[in-house]
Amino acid sequence: MKNRELIYTAIQLMEENLKSDMTVLSLCRHFGISIYYFSRLFKGITGYTPKSYMLQRKVSEAGKELAGTDKKIIHLAFDYGFGTPESFSRAFHKVTGLNPSQVRKIGKWEEKNFLRPLTREYLEKARTLSGEEPRLVILDEFHLVGIPFYFDLALKKDLSKPWSDLVSNASLVKTRVTPERYYQLQYWFDNQDEGTYFFFIALQTTGLHSIPIQFTGKTIPKQTYLHFRHHGRANRVGETYRYIYESYLPDSEYTLPHLFNFEFYGDDCKGPDRDDSISEIYIPVTLPPA
């Protein structure tokens, strides 16, 4: 088994055994590999030490149960392989800065405290994109006409229906640029719940006059952007966004001045279900001070 495959398999085993007393040492024995070598490989591929990843994932899942169920804290501690409620509380506080009793009282689990499971798809995407530096570009003001709608990620629906409505009615937009230039804008508000977005799927137009009643228009201001490329199917674009917001931007000095970003589907976009398709992602940024 190649080293990268070994780490992917190890992550899967960790995820399957979050509610157990599995240790990094027992995992290493399972693979017949030294803990030193395993730890070096794991951190090199994931960015986490195996001990830190396992602890953060246990706390993440336990936190969801704390906020969303009435299961006793002592039972959660034992469920997730902690020997005592005290050791569970110490670990919980170390990861989140909160005590389990505080989360239970609040009844809400903040996204910032949650580490999602690392998947093969995400790690492969990060591996690909880490070698492809984004371009810094300036785009002049432009106009979009299309269909806005609210979207809750928890519902796990795709966007095929609104996209079908837009494409089949594109000819109604007489001011559209031809050949058609399609965009998907995501925007939000400062006080918006995490996991929810407003989407705007649209055509680029020459202006915002004569908009058909079924559509609405937006003007996108002149702005500096980081330009990334998403390789692969449309339903995998979340992995690219995860890399951008969780890996690339945290290690950069760019700040985010606007509450939106967008995707553009140009000549390299072969279709939503093609592995060889490429779409473009634009993240508005402010340059770091000189």
Image (cartoon, rainbow, N blue to C red):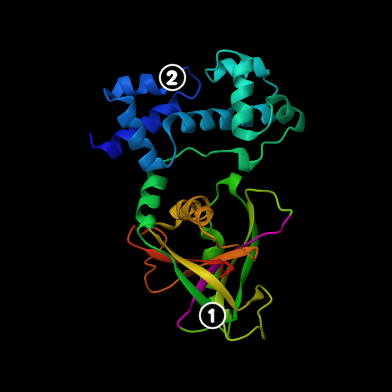
Q: Give the residue pinned by disc 1.
A: 171
Disc number for residue 22: 2
Q: Residues within 10 Å of mark 1 (few under 14, many from 20)?
A: few
**Taking 229 as reference, is 249 left or right?**
right
**Taking 232 as reference, is 101 left or right?**
right
Instruction: Read off the magenta span.
Output: 179-190
Magenta span includes 185: yes
**Taking 262 as reference, is 39 left or right?**
left
- Which x, y percent locates residue 146? 60, 72
- Which x, y percent locates residue 76? 61, 19
**What residue is rendered at 37% in x and 19% in y?**
26
Residue extending farthest front: 290
Are the residues at dot 1 and dot 2 in contact (C-beta closer than 8 Å)?
Answer: no
Q: Which one is in front, 33 or 189?
A: 33
Q: Residues within 10 Å of mark 2 (few under 14, many from 20)?
A: some
Q: Amino acid at mark 1?
A: Ser
**What residue is rendered at 69% in x and 49% in y?**
193
Q: Amino acid at mark 2?
A: Met
Q: Which one is in front, 122 or 246?
A: 246
- Which x, y percent locates residue 126? 40, 51
Mark 1, secondary structure of its residue: helix
Q: Is residue 152 above or below residue 20?
A: below
Cα–Cα span, label 1 and label 2: 59 Å
Mark 2, secondary structure of its residue: loop
